[in-house]
Every structure is written in C-alpha cells, then in structure tokens.
Image (tube, rainbow, N blue to C red):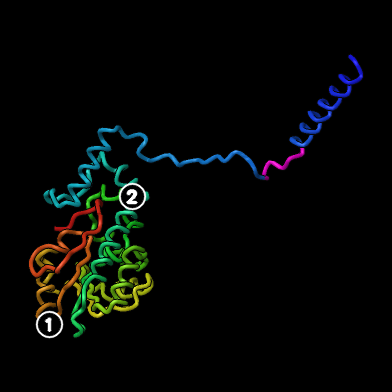
C-alpha cells in the first residue's frame, strides 16, 4: 500500500471509530429518534364483523326510535355498547347534537318578553350516570330502581360537557331554562345539589314527578308538563333529551334534539 493509500485508510478508520463512539455515548432520550406510536387495542377485537354490524344496526334503530319497548341491550352487544360509551364516538355524537342545538338557538330572534324557553331533561342529558351503568353492564342488566336510587342519592353524577356548553350558551342568549325530569319530587334536594356541583348554577323551573304522576309513562307525564308550561305563557323553542319520551307526544317544542343513549329505554 502506498503512502496516499495508507493516509486514506487511516482517515476512514478514524471516522468510523468516532461515529461508533458517538452512537455509544448518545443519550437515547435525545431527539431525533424514531417516533413510535402505540394505539390502544379496541375492545371490539374479539367480536366478529357480523356482530359489530348487527349491533351498529341495533343502535341506529334505537336512535331512530324504530324499536319497540326493550328492557336490556342485546347480550351479544355488551362489548359493543361498552366500547361506544367509553370511546370517542359517543362524545363526538354528543358534540354534534350540542353544536346543532347551539346553531339553532343562535339563529332565532327572541320575542323580547322573556318567555322563550328551552327544556332540558336531566339524566343522560345534562348529567351522566355512566359511572353507575359501568357497574351494571352498560344496560345489560334489568333496571333496578332501588340500586339506581342509591346512586342518585350520592349526588355525584358528572356534567355532560357538550350539554353544559349548550346550557351556558342558551343561558347567555337569554332563553328561560326549564328542567323537566322523570325523577320523583322526593329527590328534588339531591338533584339540585348534584346539578349545582356539576356546574349548573341557574335555571327558571325544575319540574319533577309529583304524587299523581307516578303511574304515568314518561311520554304522557312530560307532554302534560309541557302543556302546563305553555299555558303559563312560555314558548318552548327547544327541547333536549336522551329519550324519545323526552321529546315526543303532545305540546312538543319548535325543535327537539335527541342525545344518543343506547344503554336504556324509557317509554
């Protein structure tokens, strides 16, 4: 090997050695490094495509009010409903309803007499009982009044964030807020406490079931109460609820907005 060749060899060897030493001393926590993103596995991984399709069809039928009265979710859809309620899809659906409701509320010109009203249901509309249903199969178990009442009396149901945003906007726009719930009158105090702790600080009316309302279906009860509201002179411009029985019947709102709820059905 001639002198020039030796020099070139020694230079290449030195560069290679230095590069190796730098790699050994490099802090592995320093960038740039390969970016590895780990996606959480869906809880639906063990479900067949056919079951997912059937459960999706069932949920759409629930939201479209195309099913007859049902007491529990289909057994084979337990993981599907759980995945939906805990995943991004449920919140996206709620955000969509909230945004459309807000756009509608903003599009109207109020009468100026303080009698334009927006009616809100409470459970699964303003506050969420998902912590309760997570312990009861997300609707897989037959509804138990005693157990659910114990949960209500804890008064810790959290606000549904998209609904809270709508509530604040409706309040800001000057609508009267009327809360119409299927809860019994003996739960008024705990309901007020829960709503307040969840951030709902102001409303104009809170209507619960009285002694003469216990045997009425939700649809009949809420229709009657809406009629009484209009007889007081209020115009029910909007109505938000998670059940069709919150929205349908008689004396309906100018426009109603259905929030998603595949966990239970109230006729």
Viewer-side residue, 120 vs 107: 107
Q: Which range is magenta? A: 25-30
Name the element at disc 1.
loop
Q: Quadrant of the N terminus?
A: top right
Disc number for residue 221 = none
Q: Quadrant of the C terminus?
A: bottom left
Decide: is 17 above or below 2.
below
Q: Quadrant of residue 236?
A: bottom left
**Residue 172 is a magenta residue:** no
Crowd rating for badge 1 (residues with CA inside 10 Å; few <14, some 14–19, many 20+):
few
Crowd rating for badge 2 (residues with CA inside 10 Å; few <14, some 14–19, many 20+):
few
Decide: is 90 above or below 176.
above
- Sequence order check, earlier mark of 1 and 2: 2
Q: Position of residue 17 (x, y in %)?
A: 81, 29
What separation in Å lies between label 1 and label 2 (alpha carbons)? 39 Å
Decide: is 126 above or below 69.
below
Viewer-side residue, 212 vs 193: 193
List the residue tagged with mark 1: 232
Name the element at disc 2.
helix
Q: Which SS type dominates the magenta stretch?
A: loop
113 lies left or right of 163: left
For the point 73% across and 40% down, the residue is 26
For the point 7% across and 67% down, the residue is 250
Q: Quadrant of residue 205?
A: bottom left
Q: Position of residue 194 (x, y in %)?
A: 34, 71
């Amino acid at each position: 090997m001639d002198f020039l060749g030796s020099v070139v060899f020694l230079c290449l060897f030195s560069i290679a050695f230095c590069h190796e030493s730098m790699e050994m001393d490099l802090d592995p926590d320093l960038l740039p490094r390969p970016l590895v993103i780990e996606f959480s596995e869906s809880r639906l991984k063990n479900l067949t495509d056919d079951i997912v399709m059937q459960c999706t069809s069932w949920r759409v039928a629930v939201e479209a009010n195309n099913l007859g009265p049902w007491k529990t979710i289909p057994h084979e859809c337990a993981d599907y409903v759980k995945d939906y309620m805990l995943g991004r899809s449920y919140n996206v659906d709620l955000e969509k309803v909230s945004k459309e409701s807000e756009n509608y509320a903003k599009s109207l010109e109020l009468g100026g007499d303080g009698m334009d009203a927006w009616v809100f249901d409470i459970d699964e509309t303003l506050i969420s009982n998902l912590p309760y249903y997570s312990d009861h199969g997300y609707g897989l178990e037959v509804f138990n009044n005693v157990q659910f009442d114990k949960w209500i009396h804890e008064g810790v149901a959290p606000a549904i964030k998209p609904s809270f945003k709508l509530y604040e906007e409706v309040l800001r726009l000057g609508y009267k807020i009327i809360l119409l719930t299927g809860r019994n009158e003996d739960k008024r105090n705990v309901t007020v406490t829960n709503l307040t702790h969840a951030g709902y600080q102001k409303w104009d009316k809170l209507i619960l079931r009285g002694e003469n309302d216990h045997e009425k279906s939700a649809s009949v009860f809420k229709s009657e109460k809406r009629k009484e509201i209009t007889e007081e002179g209020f115009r029910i411009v909007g109505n938000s609820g998670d059940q069709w029985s919150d929205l349908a019947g008689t004396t309906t709102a100018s426009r109603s907005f259905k929030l998603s709820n595949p966990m239970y059905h109230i006729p």
